[in-house]
Amino acid sequence: MESQHIIIHNPNGLGLAARLELPETALRGMVMIAPAFGCAKDILIASRTARRLLEYGIGSLRIDFTGVGQSEGDFSFTNLDTQTQDFVSAADWLRLHVRAPDLLIGHSFGGLVAINASRLINEVKACVTIATPSTPAHVLAIIGSEKTGEIEQYGATEIEVNRQRYTLRQQFVDNARQFDMASLIAGIGVPLLMMHSPRDDMVPMQHAHALFEAASHPKSLIAIEDADHMVYERPASEFVADSIGLWSSRYLPSI
C-alpha cells in the first residue's frame, strides 16, 4: 500500500488535508470518501473502508472538510453546499494527479455530500451511502430543539461532535432546510448502494427507506445488522467495505 498525506485547496483557497491510498497491484478504480458531519478523515469507518478496498484494487482519497481535523477554515460557515464544493475540489485534484473518481462514498451527513457531488463529477459511475439521513435538516433533530432554538434566537450555538466543539450558525439551518433530497437523489443518474443499521438510534432506519424509495433504479439497500451509527465494530466495518468492493466491481473496468 502507498499512503500519502496531501493538501488540496478549495475554491476559497483553504488547504484541505487529505489521505491518498493506492494499492500495490494494478489500480482498478478510485473512490472518494466523505466522513460524517464534524468527523475527520481518519474516523474508523472511513479508514477501515479505504484500506479494505485496497484488496479489491481500489484506491481511495478521503478528506477533512473545511474547519475539521487538519484542514484550514472556520467550521461555523459549513453547510451541504460548502462540503460539496470541498469534495468536488478533491475530485479535481484526483483527476489531475491520479485519475478521476469512479465511486463516491459518504458516511452519515457525508452520504448527502456524496449524493450531491455525484451530479457534479462527470466520471462518477456509482455512489454509496452509509447511515445517511434523508435530509440535511436531520442534523437539527440530532442536536435537539434547545440548540436549534439558540441558533434561531442568537444566530449561533456550540455543539459537540465526536468529542470536538464546533459553532453552528443560522446559515447552516437555512441551507439544510432548502434541500429537497427526494428530488435530488432521483436525478443523479448513477447506481446507488445504501447501507444502514436497524440499530441506528441517531439516524433511524426509516431514513434509508426514504432514500431508497426516492432513488431511481439501479439501487440497492443492505442492512448492517451488527452496527451502531458510527459503525465502530470491526466486523461490521469490514462487512461494509467488502459489500462495497463486491457491489462496485460491476461498475469498474475488469483487469
Image (cartoon, rainbow, N blue to C red):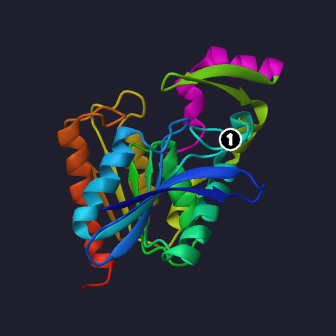
Bin the neighbour count of mark 1 within 10 Å (Cα to Cα): few under 14, some 14-19, many 20 and up: few
- Residue 104 visible to an observer of this rendering: no
> Can the viewer see residue 161?
yes
Residue closest to the eye, 73 or 171: 73
Helix, strand or loop: magenta stretch? helix
The quadrant where residue 91 appears: bottom right
Return the residue nearer the eye: 151 or 38.
38
Q: In this view, does 42 lie above or below 112?
A: above
Judged from the image, the secondary structure of the residue bearing numbered disc 1 is helix
Q: Residue at x 31, y 52 (%)?
A: 49
The location of residue 14, given as percent across then percent down, is: 73, 51
* Residue at 51% in and 78% down: 123
Query: Which image quarter holds the C terminus?
Result: bottom left
Residue 175: image location, x then y, percent: 72, 43
Snapshot quadrant of residue 201: top left
Q: Toward the viewer: 222 or 58?
A: 58
x then y, percent, for residue 191: 39, 70
Q: Give the range drawn in magenta.
A: 134-154
The one nearer the camera, 106 or 162, is: 162
Q: Residue 193 at x, y = what percent?
A: 34, 60
